[in-house]
Image (cartoon, helix red, strand yellow):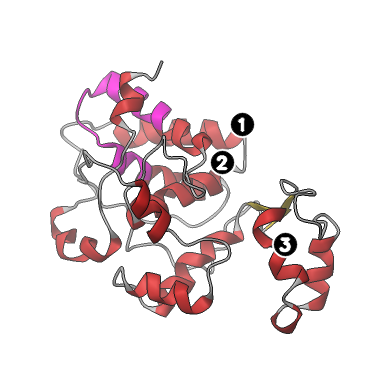
Amino acid sequence: MVSRLSLACVVFSLFLISSCFPCQAQLSSNFYDSTCPNALTTIRTAIRRAVSSERRMAASLIRLHFHDCFVQIARNSHSAITIQSGGFEVVDDAKAQVESICPGVVSCADIAAVAARDASVAVGGPSWTVRLGRRDSTTASRSLADSDIPRATTSLANLIGMFNGKGLSERDMVALSGSHTIGQARCVTFRGRIYDNSSDIDAGFASTRRRNCPSASGNGNNNLAPLDLESHSKEGTSSVRPRAL
């Protein structure tokens, strides 16, 4: 049975990046200082524990926050790009702990935002100031998730268009994509790029990836490989901090 807290976090706030800029003045890094002074410490402890148990969780939490900003997310969606439940469960756990000290005060959307920052720090990546005060949406749309969230196979032209649609430039897109320096990817998500894309990929890199990713479809789909050969367990500090989120 789904807990009440899980139901409360089924959908995060509808804070599309394109609409964040005009409302930034309403957000504040000290939003909960008087209403829930221990909220950030409580969230940080929960995130550190989760990442310590499973280091890949850091990447999942950062991705979860990006998706939350990019579109409404439904936990029970059966979309091909549904958020992995692992990252959601960590946010849900942090929410439960915050609720135990400050019932009904801190939104799931804010917890997701803080969790992404704390996850980055937990693996030696950059930190940034999180502006708080988001409110949770009461609706979710699987169709929006299907149409708005970039896929591993999305072309560069379409990626640029999707980010432009959220009010983000090509520079913003590259900066946010820098978060992919942490984490690992499944073979099925990059097979086409290492076998059918010899014109614009480093031959040595492609060869390295092929060692753990067979060319035959359906064979080794879930084999994992680092997204970055040098810093897959540590977010690159050269990436621009996601201030827009």
**Of residues 41 and 49, which is closer to you in this image?**
49
Residue at left 53%, top 31%?
A: 49
Query: Residue 104 — which label?
Result: none
Image-based side of 46 in relation to 97, left or right: right
Name of the residue lying farthest toward the left? 26
Quadrant assignment for the C terminus: bottom left
The Cα–Cα distance between marks 1 and 2, rounded to whole angstroms, is 8 Å
Q: Which residue is mark 2?
A: 57
* In front: label 3 or label 1: 3
Q: Is residue 146 in the magenta section?
A: no
Image-based side of 61 in relation to 21, left or right: right
Quadrant assignment for the N terminus: top left
Q: Which residue type does callout 1 highlight? A: Ser
* In front: label 1 or label 2: 2
Give the mark nearer the N terminus: 3 vs 2. 2
Q: Which residue is mark 3?
A: 191
The Cα–Cα distance between marks 3 and 1, rounded to whole angstroms, is 29 Å
Give x and y (percent) for residue 157. Answer: 48, 79
Q: Which residue type does callout 3 highlight? A: Arg
Give x and y (percent) for residue 137. Answer: 22, 42
Q: Are marks 1 and 2 in contact (CB under 8 Å)?
A: yes
Q: Please identify the quarter of the rendering in which residue 98 is found.
A: top left
Look at the magenta stretch and give its main secondary structure.
helix
Image-based side of 124 in relation to 98, left or right: right
* In front: label 3 or label 2: 3
Q: Which residue is mark 1?
A: 53
Q: Which residues are magenta?
A: 92-112
Q: Is residue 102 in the magenta section?
A: yes
**Of residues 180 and 152, which is closer to you in this image?**
152
Q: Which residue type does callout 2 highlight? A: Met
